[in-house]
Image: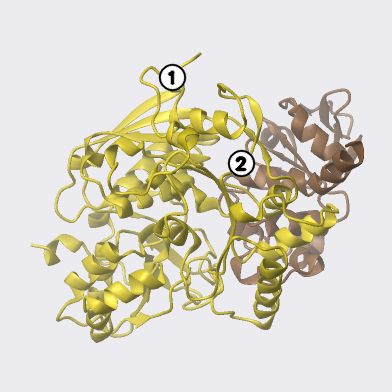
């Protein structure tokens, strides 16, 4: 089970908001993390802690294929992104970097900004850790995505499959 | 065997299957795999996998276009590394700084052909559909997987049949049709789908216009977009491979998830308002909005016909005082043709800054960033907040004609009064 503070965002959070193009010449993960979500919330990088969760509306990660969007969030401490829907390239990039993207149609109405949210994949539950009993519905994680996530990301999976050959 | 759409045929071949159906997960081998300035990220993940050689270096293309020439020491360092990597691993095709934009070059050089599967680590890889290929955008780590093992997992998309009928009226171009398409579909209306174009609009072959449409399909979330080669058979080079040629056309009874149509003849010039591409309105509704910069270029609209339209409007005129007009040809070949035709001279005479071929300021890296509160009208594909510099700047998207007319007036202008 993964638990962390949830940060709420709206719909159509694009990759220019997650990490503006002017920072893409710098490949330092710490540098990218320092500017995570800067286009939407200047203080995000200073507020976010290891293990935190993003809760967002529709089409999270719309726009560019820049993997730095996933890198910035991962290294800022984010472990899970729960959104009503994702832009497809961002979704792939996120899981490739070991983030867990979860599609939940009612996440933004169920949770409150800053509260602790728990994700229990084994029992199929995403819930607020207070005793209110608030739970979000979510779609089953596709098996290929689960495989990559369980290997810690795509590089991890590629290494594993090499060993199995 | 079931009847397939163009995309399904290409993906079936690329995964060694007789047929595929939407939703199926396949392992596909691309005919061409392209990465740009993010090749350094590709390389880092490739090394992390433990791979020591590229599975099929002949299928790999690398283009330096996003920060070309290097805008910072960091960019210069990674480009230096990329040049070393290209040599060390025998990468088949390399286009250095100054060649142009990746999507333009791969089409222009005939590397991408009808029926091929092209994977690119760029979201506008949908552009390759303009020659009847299937182009899919991914991130750098997925590209590292292709380098290491030659293939990539993909979900077979549902296809949308989009019919574009009729001939556009004066002052209406492929860009206006593309903006209409994105506004009709919405920013995620084609998510995880392939848009297959049909209709009488395509009966006059025009590669540049098809590139604009397939390029902008990405803004509706499309995984890929393509035009069957029956519309432009003699305009492009076809593959020598019989199996690739067999994937050029959809089956007659292929099944589509949705069917939509756009009447090109009913459109007027459009603009995408800040800060979402689907936020479209007729140019007449924002006429007079003052601008600080006009940008003509990109993989959407930086081709010879685009520069030609702009120069025909700007000929004998000057851009408004206080406005910058940045022109970035999409490739060296386009730049040279525009020079020979006098287009570049006309643009410079009118007050334009003409940059080297490449992505220019489109993604906010260099060559014309925006300050707080500034307004830009761009022929590019994205108008997100902060896309071209300050997050307090605003970006409108429009056709090259509307960009040129607006540069003359110093405010958003209807191009039709300059075309009559």
Question: Splitting the image into 4 quarters, where does residue A22 fall?
Answer: bottom right
Which quarter of the image is occupied by the C terminus of chain B? bottom left
Tally of numbered discs? 2
Give residue B23's position: percent from left, percent from top: 60, 25
Q: Secondary structure at mark 2?
A: helix
In front: label 1 or label 2: 1
Above or below — where is B154 with respect to A122? Answer: below
Q: Nearer the viewer, residue B99 or A23?
A: B99
**Colour scheme of the picture:** by chain
Q: Secondary structure at mark 1?
A: loop
Q: What shade does chain A have?
A: brown
Give residue A37's position: percent from left, percent from top: 68, 59
Q: Nearer the viewer, residue B413 or B99?
A: B99
Q: Is residue B222 visible?
A: no
Q: Is residue B22 left or right of A37 when viewed as pictured?
A: left
Q: Nearer the viewer, residue B83 or B293?
A: B83
Question: Splitting the image into 4 quarters, where does residue B283 fall?
Answer: bottom left
Q: Residue at x 58, y 29 (%)?
A: B156
Q: Which residue is mark 2?
A: A88
Q: Which residue is mark 1?
A: B255
Question: Splitting the image into 4 quarters, where does residue B234 fall?
Answer: top left
Q: Residue at x 82, y 39 (%)?
A: A149
Q: What shade does chain B have?
A: yellow
Chain for disc number 2: A
Chain for disc number 1: B
Give residue B249's position: percent from left, percent from top: 38, 31
Give residue B103's position: percent from left, percent from top: 47, 57
Q: Tell me how far mark 1 sits from mark 2, CA to CA.
A: 23 Å
Above or below — where is A156 with respect to A15? Answer: above
Above or below — where is A157 with respect to B250? Answer: below
- Point out the residue furthest to the top here: B1
């Amino acid at each position: 089970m993964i638990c962390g503070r949830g940060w709420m965002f709206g719909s159509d959070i694009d990759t220019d908001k997650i990490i503006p193009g002017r920072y893409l010449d710098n490949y330092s993960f710490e540098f990218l993390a320092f500017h995570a979500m800067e286009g939407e919330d200047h203080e995000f990088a200073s507020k976010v802690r290891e293990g935190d969760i993003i809760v967002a509306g529709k089409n999270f990660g719309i726009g560019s294929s820049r993997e730095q969007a996933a890198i910035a969030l991962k290294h800022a401490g984010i472990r899970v992104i729960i959104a009503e829907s994702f832009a497809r390239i961002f979704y792939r990039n996120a899981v490739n970097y070991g983030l867990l993207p979860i599609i939940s149609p009612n996440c933004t109405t169920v949770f409150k900004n800053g509260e602790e949210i728990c994700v229990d994949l084994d029992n199929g539950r995403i819930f607020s850790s207070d005793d209110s009993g608030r739970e979000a519905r979510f779609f089953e994680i596709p098996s290929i995505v689960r495989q990559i996530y369980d290997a810690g990301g795509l590089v991890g999976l590629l290494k594993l499959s090499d060993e199995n050959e | 065997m079931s009847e397939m759409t163009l995309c399904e045929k290409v993906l079936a071949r690329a995964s060694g299957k007789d047929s595929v159906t939407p939703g199926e997960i396949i392992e596909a081998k691309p005919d061409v795999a392209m990465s740009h300035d993010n090749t350094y990220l590709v390389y880092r993940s490739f090394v992390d996998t433990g791979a020591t050689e590229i599975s099929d270096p002949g299928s790999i293309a690398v283009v330096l276009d996003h920060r070309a020439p290097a805008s910072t020491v960091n960019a210069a360092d990674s480009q230096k590394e990329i040049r070393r990597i290209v040599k060390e691993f025998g990468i088949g095709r390399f286009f250095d700084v100054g060649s142009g934009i990746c999507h333009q070059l791969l089409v222009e050089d005939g590397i991408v052909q009808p029926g091929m599967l092209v994977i690119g680590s760029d979201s506008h890889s949908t552009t390759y559909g303009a020659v009847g290929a299937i182009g899919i955008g991914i991130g750098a780590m997925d590209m590292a997987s292709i380098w290491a093992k030659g293939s990539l997992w993909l979900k077979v998309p549902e296809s949308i049949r989009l019919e574009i009928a009729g001939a556009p009226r004066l002052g209406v171009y492929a860009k206006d049709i593309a903006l209409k398409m994105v506004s009709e579909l919405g920013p995620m209306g084609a998510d995880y789908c392939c848009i297959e174009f049909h209709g009488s609009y395509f009966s006059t072959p025009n590669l540049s216009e098809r590139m604009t449409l397939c390029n902008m399909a990405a803004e509706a979330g499309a995984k890929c977009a393509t035009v069957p080669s029956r519309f432009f058979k003699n305009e492009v080079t076809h593959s020598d491979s019989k199996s690739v040629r067999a994937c050029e056309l959809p089956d007659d009874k292929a099944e589509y998830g949705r069917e939509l149509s756009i009447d090109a003849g009913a459109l007027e010039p459009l603009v995408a308002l800040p800060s979402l591409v689907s936020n479209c309105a007729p140019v007449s509704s924002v006429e007079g909005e003052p601008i600080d910069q006009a940008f003509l270029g990109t993989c959407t609209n930086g081709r010879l016909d685009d520069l030609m339209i702009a120069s025909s409007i700007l000929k004998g005129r000057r851009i408004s005082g206080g406005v910058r007009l940045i022109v970035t040809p999409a490739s060296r070949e386009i730049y040279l043709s525009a020079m020979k035709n006098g287009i570049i001279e006309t643009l410079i005479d009118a007050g334009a800054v003409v940059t080297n071929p490449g992505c220019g300021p489109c993604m906010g890296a260099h060559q014309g960033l925006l300050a707080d509160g500034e307004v830009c009208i761009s022929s590019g594909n994205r108008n997100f907040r902060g896309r071209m510099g300050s997050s307090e700047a605003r970006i409108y998207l429009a056709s090259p004609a509307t960009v040129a007319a607006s540069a003359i007036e110093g405010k958003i202008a209807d191009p039709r009064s300059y075309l009559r």
